[in-house]
């Protein structure tokens, strides 16, 4: 029931695209650890923006150190505090495998045109993640309209309890990902030599 309500809140296609986390930070780290280590290789690039919260910078820096990938940034224009979208297409080259960006900046208040940005990335086969920590409590967030592969939010940013969050993941992407953590509830069977895991989203909720 709770997964279904979260799916309805984000207009996800089903509850199977909703993963409960401890917050936006863990959602981003989950993607970095599960998607990142299986899809990135030396020379690949992760595109962020210069207005990201630390939680959307540090996990990717750590991932880059582990995989040999490189983190690059879309600049913010001077006093306006807007992304320099004139440079977006040139940065979205074949070396970029993932684009991760904030929906509403926690420091500038800038509302980024995430649907347009994700569409431009998707045309090039680039996976996208949207940090909706600041937007989910203040405006409708529709993952199908945005067209992102992942979207993360925190409960406490929208008058909910601390220590809870949601990671939306497009079903086709989640199906191919390995578990983030191991433990109870995310398994089908366990023996001394191997383990069989549940389907998403339960595979990611140890």
Image (spheres, helix red, strand yellow):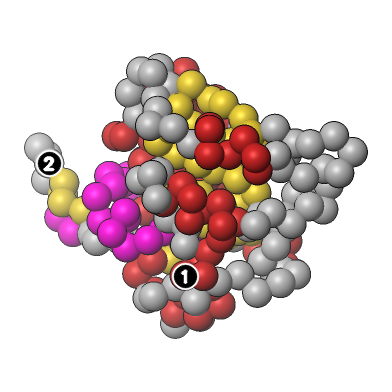
| Among the two numbered marks 1 and 2 on one chain, the one whose residue lies closer to the N terminus | 1
In the rendered view, would you say 139 is above or below 19?
Answer: below
Residue closer to the observer: 157 or 126: 126
User: Is any part of residue 154 visible from this angle?
Assistant: yes
- Residue for point 38% across, 44% down: 124
Residue closer to the observer: 52 or 66: 52
- Residue for point 56% across, 60% down: 115
- Residue for point 61% across, 70% down: 141
What is the span of residues highlighted in magenta in the rendered image?
167-189
Measured in 3D between alpha carbons, the distance from the residue under mark 1 to the one under mark 2, in whole angstroms, is 37 Å
Q: Nearer the viewer, mark 1 or mark 2?
A: 1
Residue closer to the observer: 192 or 173: 173
Q: Position of residue 151 (x, y in %)?
A: 52, 57
Q: On the picture, is 90 further left or further right than 169?
A: right
Circle 1 Cα neighbour tier, 10 Å, few/some/many (<14 / 14–19 / ≥20) = some
Instruction: Determine whether label 1 and label 2 are within 8 Å by CB.
Output: no
Residue indicated by mark 2: 194
Q: Position of residue 9 (x, y in %)?
A: 56, 77
Circle 2 Cα neighbour tier, 10 Å, few/some/many (<14 / 14–19 / ≥20) = few
Q: Which mark is residue 144?
A: 1
């Amino acid at each position: 029931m709770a997964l279904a309500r979260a799916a309805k809140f984000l207009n996800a296609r089903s509850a199977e695209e909703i993963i409960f986390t401890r917050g936006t930070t863990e959602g981003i780290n989950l993607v970095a650890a599960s998607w990142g280590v299986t899809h990135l290789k030396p020379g690949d690039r992760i595109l962020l923006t210069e207005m990201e919260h630390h939680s959307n910078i540090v996990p990717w820096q750590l991932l880059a150190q582990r995989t040999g990938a490189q983190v690059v940034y879309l600049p913010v224009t001077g006093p306006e505090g807007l992304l320099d979208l004139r440079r977006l297409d040139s940065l979205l080259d074949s070396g970029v495998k993932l684009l991760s960006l904030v929906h509403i900046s926690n420091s500038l208040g800038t509302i980024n045109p995430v649907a347009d940005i994700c569409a431009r990335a998707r045309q090039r086969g680039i996976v996208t993640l949207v940090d909706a920590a600041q937007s989910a409590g203040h405006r409708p967030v529709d993952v199908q309209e945005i067209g992102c592969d992942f979207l993360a939010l925190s409960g406490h940013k929208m008058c909910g309890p601390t220590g809870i969050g949601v990671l939306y993941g497009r079903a086709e992407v989640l199906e191919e990902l390995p578990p983030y953590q191991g433990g109870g509830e995310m398994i089908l069977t366990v023996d001394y030599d191997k383990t069989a895991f549940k389907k998403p989203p339960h595979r990611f909720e140890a």
